[in-house]
Image (cartoon, coloured by chain):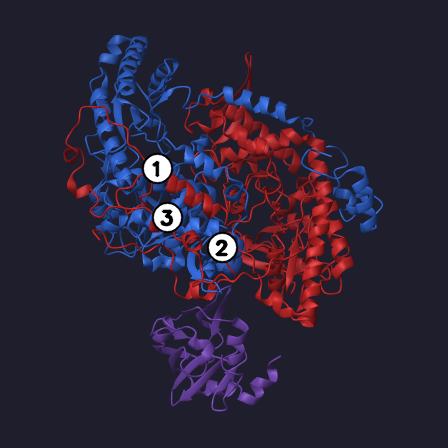
Amino acid sequence: MSRYTAVTPEDLEQMLATIGAASIDELFEQVPEGVRLGRELDLPEGMSEQEVYGHLLELSRANTSADDEITFLGAGMYDHYAPAVIDMLLGRSEFLTPYTPYQPEISQGSLQVMFEYQTAISELTGLPVSNASVYEGPSAVGAAGYLAKLANGKSKFVVSRGLHPHSRETLRTLSHGYGIEVVEVPLSGGVTDPDAWAAAIDGDSCAVFFQQPNFLGIVEDAAALAEAAKNSPAVVVGSYDPIPLGILASPGECGVDVAVGEGQTLGNRLDFGGPSFGFFAATAAYLRKMPGRIAGETTDVDGRRGFVLTLQTREQHIRREKATSNICTSQALNALAGVVYLSWLGRDGIVELAELLLQRTAYARERLSGVEGVEELFDGPVVREFAVDLDVADTAAVERVISRCQDRGINPGYAVGRDYEEFPTALLVAITEQRTAEQIDMLAETLAEAMAEERAAAGVGEAAS
Amino acid sequence: MADASYPAELIYHPEHDWARVEGDVATFGITWYAQDALGEVVFFDPPDPGTQVEAGAPYAEVESVKAVSEVIAPLSGEVIEVNGALGDTPEAINDDPYGSGWMVKVRLSDVSETEALMDATAYEAILP
Amino acid sequence: MTTVAPRPPASADSATPMQRDEVRTIFEKGARGRRAFQCPPAGVPERNPHELLPESLRRREPARLPEVSEPELVRHYVRLSRRNFDLDSGFYPLGSCTMKHNPRLHERVTALPGHARMHPLQDPRRAQGALELMWNLERALGEVAGLPAVSLQPSAGSHGELAGVLLTRAYHESRGDARTKVLTPDTAHGTNPATVTMAGYEVVKVGTNADGGVDMDDLREKVDDQVACLMLTNPNTLGLFDPNIEEIAELVHGVGATLYYDGANLNAVMGRSRPGDMGFDIVHFNLHKSFTQPHGGGGPGSGPIAVSERIEPFLPVPVITRSETPDGPVFDLDYDRPQSIGRLRGFQGNYGCFVRSYAYICSLGAEGLRDASEIAVLNANYLLARLRELVGEELPLAFGDRCMHEFVLSGEPMKRDLGIKTLDLAKRLLDHGFHPPTVYFPLLVDEALLMEPTETETRETLDAFAEAVASVVAEAREDPEVAAEAPYTTPVRRLDEAGAAKNPVIRQELAADGA
């Protein structure tokens, strides 16, 4: 008997008698002898609760978390502050432990949360239709691709290289299955090359994808990118960072058909990459092609307001091989964090937060550009993240600089060259409201030291050339 | 919801579809039995006018809350009109399956196909 | 628990102010200018924001997010939470869902800053604890599955399935073998056929025999060199272990196809029988089922996959590696995998879920996992025996005699003789304080009730549930109308789902701005 089961020897005897079986082994007789394991699994012995806690604590201490260093690392997930109310609400049994709301009469809490979440995402994106969330950001981009395939059946995805590398790779993995070709459009001056973009879009284009702000942190002219696809069959997909949307032109205002994005920054933890949620919103034309769960408002037999899962005929449990997606559920708990966070920020708060990021990022960009051997990579507008170019030999050298900074307690960001051969010596620096002016000053000083060390190690003459 | 009925002036396909033939144009819909089996219809997804439909093949979808059914064409031809009113009132398919619940009008490519369909008596005989 | 409160008189008109308040959304609360957030000062020399971000790139319409104070925010969501049923307060015999207890230890360890506050792109040298945890979890899952390699990346069971079918595609393509079809049993969950289409294959259904297993004649007829894969759940959705599994594997491998194990029902056989030993090439786990994650009202989950040696080269990137050094083992992420299918999502997967399931496996160990499956099977057979004793005529077992971890009853006799449907029974159980079993699945049983009690429920709970089912049946014998209109005691009663689908209202309409 483990601590999570409750069958005493006496229970066992009585239960077997009720069943009419002599032993537990007898209950497993339908398993053919040839496939019975016949030994114990080769796993360590079980542990008491405090031993497990100790082991997991020890593992956690072998990690350098965002609490252990001042981090400017972003590139898709960001160290934003999540208010205490989120921990408290997500820890409630009534939100933490229910199943998917198949029985709406006893799931009004979860269903109303979905409805409120959908409303918040719809407001943020300026698009009328939102589902109740999907797995996370890059797979949401993949899901948008499948929607486009079902909508127009064309053969080509046109993808800006400003789209997060994980999103591009995910899209390529998924589209290989259903046979759509992926064409990448390069960046020019830090944004999607408008001429190459327009030239790549034609009558075979199934969907076009860009990211806002793009991977280098630069704000794209989303309206122009969408406009370029207007005379093609392509579904225009934008992958958005939600907090900058407090001030950036919304997907709806820019003529984007489907807006998706990573929801981690909306009240979710970093969690080494997940779980978080992906948001997925669209114009009304795609309502019946949406993947995933959607909650809708209705009334009960007594006329009381209530909420149900609706438009379920899109989904796999009904439409099976013709479903709009194979996804079974949403990321309900993470989406709850999202709507609580957006309600906590509020209408004015999200604007104030985005403006704060704008100011601090501008300050950081200026400070770092003043460091010897560090230059702005591109000068386009940025909100929360920007790239600088380090005067070092290669990507490995950038990674050494990062490591030297980390040894001093500061994580300066992400080595862009890991994913972009065209920017081998770029460093991507992210700002949140948790990074103060003093910390930004420390970053500039630390980066200067690390650069000097790296250049000295590489040989001054070489570094200066 | 109306009581079970199978009007004598219509002809029937075994997949529970009816046709009303006037010259070389036929109106299609689903039978009382089909709408009863489906339950309350919440959505009708019609073909575009101009679409070619083929006898025995699906041409539209009809949805209840927890089911989707393909609607089978009893005869072949080109869709010349779609019942747009079903967009707002799909329940007409339940309430009046042979009247306001009609689905499409089709210009028949081969009127002789009607000979393969059943009359009301023959159709009722195949119902469980 | 069997006494039922009388039907309350509350209606839309007679609702008290508090009852009316309960169904107002967060968007209908608060007031313009109210807030819970206090923005910190920028603390940097202020620049003209319109120079930093030109007007042409700025939004014209504000996002009309809620405007509430913190107390309002807390009260709103706490009150909403009370309109939910949840596993911590009640029994969920939901077949195929494995609603086992969620230990609170898991929430505590997952929240440790060294786990919760880890950035996914942290240098692997500074993420050794996370990578070691993932490595250990991979090894444990591989041992449970009886397969040598594991990827934790997929975000859910459905995502794991997609990974599995894409791996199958990559495997065949690497051999220059373009295949077109995937076989799924007609009892399969809808995800299987949906996944097959998304991976670019055609679905071919295989029938079920009179004993509830795969129809071997039908399989023999359909398995050919165009078949890429057979997707199977074992024990299947009827709660029965397929006695022909070895022959099935032989047939499928005989034509060069892969055998895919949908891990939905793994909780029946942990430490007793392993998919790898049955001949499966690819297995997906539902960490939120067998390895206990809180379901969160519908997510998050996690769907790792285990694969055989021939499939291993195609696993998604990155792959975790471990190498011995003089200073001990070092863990890293390997992206250089030329045959990989690529990524399925961002970063490394739902690490928060890995921490919980790893803690669970550490707690239980080998013996505990086996015990979990054994008690799950014992509890299911006990509940089945109790229900047969009490309502065996109205709700007979659909297939077989004994079951594994779950079983399917047919509500057909109850519907015929008593005039109440499975749905009515399910709704009436809500008034008894129980979550109903899975209903109308699997599709091949009329009026199906699929029940899975899990190992963490006590005998007393199983007895109480069986008695509740019996009392609903007895009540229906007297007056079927009671169940037909149930529930009566829930926050709302039966809802107009047809109305919701006909005229979809899927977001709150907000007053025009400036009003």
Q: Position of residue C484 (x, y in %)?
A: 59, 67
Q: Residues within 10 Å of mark 2 (few under 14, many from 20)?
A: many
Residue behind mark 2: C197
The chain identifier of the residue carrying mark 1 reads: A
Looking at the colours in the rendered structure, which chain would you say is drawn in blue?
A
Q: Mark on residue C26? A: 3
Q: Position of residue B21 (x, y in %)?
A: 42, 88
Q: Kindly identify the residue that appears in the image at 61 percent across and 33 percent down.
A: C360
The residue under label 1 is which amino acid type?
His
The residue under label 2 is which amino acid type?
Thr
Looking at the colours in the rendered structure, which chain would you say is drawn in purple?
B
The chain identifier of the residue carrying mark 2 reads: C
Total tally of numbered discs in the picture: 3
Depth check: give the residue in front, C206 or C55.
Answer: C55
The residue under label 3 is which amino acid type?
Ile
Q: Position of residue B1 (x, y in %)?
A: 49, 79
